[in-house]
Image (spheres, helix red, strand yellow):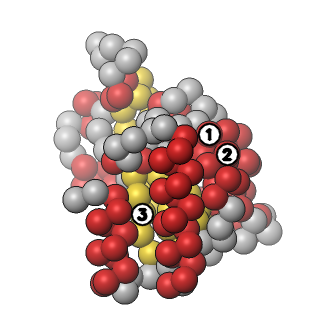
Amino acid sequence: MTLEDFIHRARKLEVDGVSLESCFIDRFDSAYLSEWFSIAAKEVEKRGIKMAVENHIDYNSDEIFTLLKNVNSPNMGINFDTGNFVRVLDDPVKAMGKLVKHVFATHIKDLKIQKGAAVDDWYFFSCTPVGDGGIVDNQKIGQLLEDNGFEGFMAVEIDFLHPDYKNDEDKAVAQSVKELKRIALAVEKNK
């Protein structure tokens, strides 16, 4: 299914929103990207749909910001993935500062380096439960979202669990949810 097919299918299903991972974009020439996103933005605007593009270990925050600025649609934003910004060597707190007004959804991760992985392996920065990795300051991410009126929720995503956690994804998710609830309470108190 092409991205265009996906958009048409979403329209037929009358969904309220879609999230597109940029890794599924099959062309990266500027003509296609500007045409495709502009057409998609017009389609989602007509139908009142929100469309979020996830940074997926490919674009940094400046590139995502440029894409959103060029499309210039209130219905197009970002599914902000904290870990994927780290993986392209972009500070997720600084990235959130640039993009917070365009955030429709989140994938909250924490990461730590996996010994033995090559630096250019995408899992070199492997997931940990939120709060354990120490690379992503999710407290500051949460505060920026709160301060800017974000109405969504912080969704946990674990894409490659660090071997220290012995493949116990359920435990990692439970610990992450507990930490995100703590963060949510803390940032609400700082209002």
**Residue 96 percent across, percent down from the top left:** 67, 49
| Sequence-first disc among 2 and 3 | 3
Residue 66 numbered tag: 2
What is the secondary structure assignment of the residue under circle 1?
Answer: helix
Residue 188 in the image: above or below residue 179: below
Q: Nearer the viewer, residue 28 or 168?
A: 28
Amino acid at the residue labelled 2: Thr
**Residue 116 percent across, percent down from the top left:** 29, 13
Q: Real-space Cα distance between discs 2 and 1? A: 5 Å
**Proximity of marks 2 and 3: CB atoms separated by less than 8 Å:** no
Residue 45 vs residue 166: left or right?
A: right
Question: Residue at left 20%, top 36%?
Answer: 166
Amino acid at the residue labelled 1: Glu
Q: Residues within 10 Å of mark 1 (few under 14, many from 20)?
A: few
Amino acid at the residue labelled 3: Ser
Q: Nearer the viewer, residue 131 or 23?
A: 23
